[in-house]
Image (cartoon, rainbow, N blue to C red):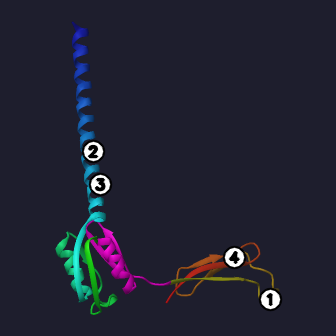
Amino acid sequence: MIKKKLLHILSQKSFCKYVLVMKLATIFTLLTTLQISAAVYSQNTKVNINVKNTTLLEIFNEIERQSEFRIFYKIDQLDLNKRYSLDASNTSVSDILNDLLFKTNASYKLLDKIIVITPIKEVQQQKISGTVTDATNGEPIIGANVVIEGTTIGTVTDANGKFSLDISKQD
């Protein structure tokens, strides 16, 4: 009799664990499916825009009207008065933005259903190198800190007193 009760209790615990695992698996599957559908939406949204001599602002408004996207940008970073002609039938939003923003020297990022427009800044790399020596005897100084004034960019000299810094110069 005691064995039957013990087996019954163990089977109830196993059943509860089984049900809990099934609930968690269902929730995980549902969340994964929702995430995938959000990513696919941003890549496959198609719009129809056929405009001539229209401002960038009007094109952005048309994209927002035909899709669920919202477009964010800084007014002073884009030339909103420049006129464009665009004939895009059943074209993805990303293709339209690539074409338009290539001409404006700007870029964009898709964050769920938000499009953030940012300017492209040309970055040039510059390398600064040298040797730090003692002024009195000319011997290299090991472990000297070399810092670009007004920044946190810096390095330490090696065993020969040499250093090298890679910095980016923005135009």
Residue most extreme to the top: 1
Separation of disc 3 and disc 2 at Cα? 11 Å
The residue that appears at 27% across and 93% down in the rendered structure is 81
Residue 136 against residue 31 in the figure, above or below: below
Amino acid residing under circle 4: Thr
In this rendering, the label closer to the viewer, 1 or 4: 4
Q: State the CA–CA distance, disc 3 to disc 1.
A: 67 Å
Q: Secondary structure at mark 4?
A: loop
Q: Position of residue 11 (x, y in %)?
A: 24, 20
Q: Is residue 111 left or right of residue 166?
A: left
Identify residue type, mark 3: Ile
Q: Residues within 10 Å of mark 1 (few under 14, many from 20)?
A: few
The residue where tag 1 is placed is: 136
First reached walking from the N terminus: tag 1 or tag 4 = 1
Q: Which residue is mark 3?
A: 36
Q: CA distance from mark 4 to mark 2?
A: 54 Å
Q: Earlier in the sequence, mark 4 or mark 2?
A: 2
Instruction: Quickly name the residue at label 2.
Output: 29
Distance Cα–Cα, label 4 vs label 3: 49 Å
> Which residue carries the number 4 mark?
157
Magenta stretch?
Answer: 93-122
